[in-house]
Image (cartoon, rainbow, N blue to C red):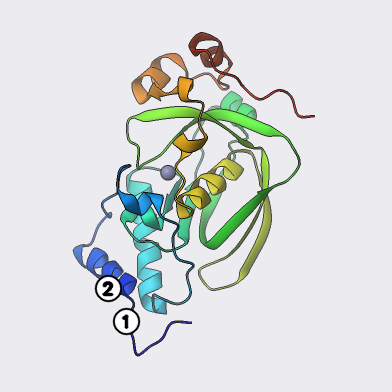
Amino acid sequence: MGTPRERSPLAERVEELLAVGGPLPIVEAGDPVLRRAAEPFDGQLPPALLAGFVEALRLTMRAAPGVGLAAPQVGVGLRIAVIEDPAPVPEEVRVARGRVPQPFRVLVNPSYEPVGGARAAFFEGCLSVPGWQAVVARPAQVRLRATDERGLAVDEVFSGWPARIVQHETDHLDGVLYLDRAESRSLSSSRAVAGLWSQPTPERAAAALGFELPGPAA
Ligand code: ZN
């Protein structure tokens, strides 16, 4: 746990962020904090400050709006992320993408590993790369290990869109952006996605833009 006699610079940073109030400013691609591996959380923030930080992450995620937010995206290099997806999508999108509602969760020190060989590819975006989306093929199912904000162990298999969210957010904590894993030829402005590629799956985009999609699961 943290050493009470010595205040962590990260605690000071978080106190400064919370002092302003309201949604936190989101760091954008190009800032080195998004490219560094975040420090494992080990009590650097005392409990009340951790609770305040988690609440600020939730507020910021909802205001953006987004379905996940990792601490480095607000300039804090700690392995903490929040996720939440009310999934307000049409039925055909829900079915094709497995986009089911994901309640609010706090992931502390998460890591994941694929379960099975199936991969799923869909357009994905990031609050730190505003205005753009790209298709990312990811494991369709992952086993996530973490703790929650109370320190209780999480060991859970995620599928569908929630699996994509936990991978995207955990990747942030390793200094990885979704663009590192994306089909670069799929890169599309949000306007182009809304106008051309809003189908439930990216097959038409793949044919028209010239990129590969993963084959059926072996
Ligand atoms: Zn992101």
Quarter-of-image position of residue 52: bottom left
Q: Is mark 2 within 8 Å of ligand 1?
A: no
Q: Are marks 2 and 1 in contact (CB under 8 Å)?
A: yes
Residue 53 spot, x, y in % from top left: 36, 66
Q: Is mark 1 within 8 Å of ligand 1?
A: no
Residue 70 spot, x, y in % from top left: 42, 54
Residue at 54%, 27% (x, y): give it.
90
- In the displayed structure, 26 sits above or below 123; it is below
Residue at 58%, 36% (x, y): give it.
99
Q: Give the position of the C terminus as an image quadrant.
A: top right
- In the displayed structure, 190 sits above or below 181; it is above
Residue 43 spot, x, y in % from top left: 45, 77
Q: Residue furthest bottom?
A: 5
- Secondary structure at badge 1 equals loop
Q: Is residue 30 left or right of residue 179?
A: left
Residue 66 spot, x, y in % from top left: 41, 43
Type of amino acid at the residue the image marks with label 1:
Arg
Residue denoted by label 1: 7
- In the displayed structure, 38 sits above or below 87; it is below
Type of amino acid at the residue the image marks with label 2:
Glu
Quarter-of-image position of residue 161: top right
Residue denoted by label 2: 12
Foreground residue among 31 and 129: 31
Residue at 49%, 67% (x, y): give it.
40
Counting residues from the N terminus, which is met first, the one under dot 2 or under dot 1?
1
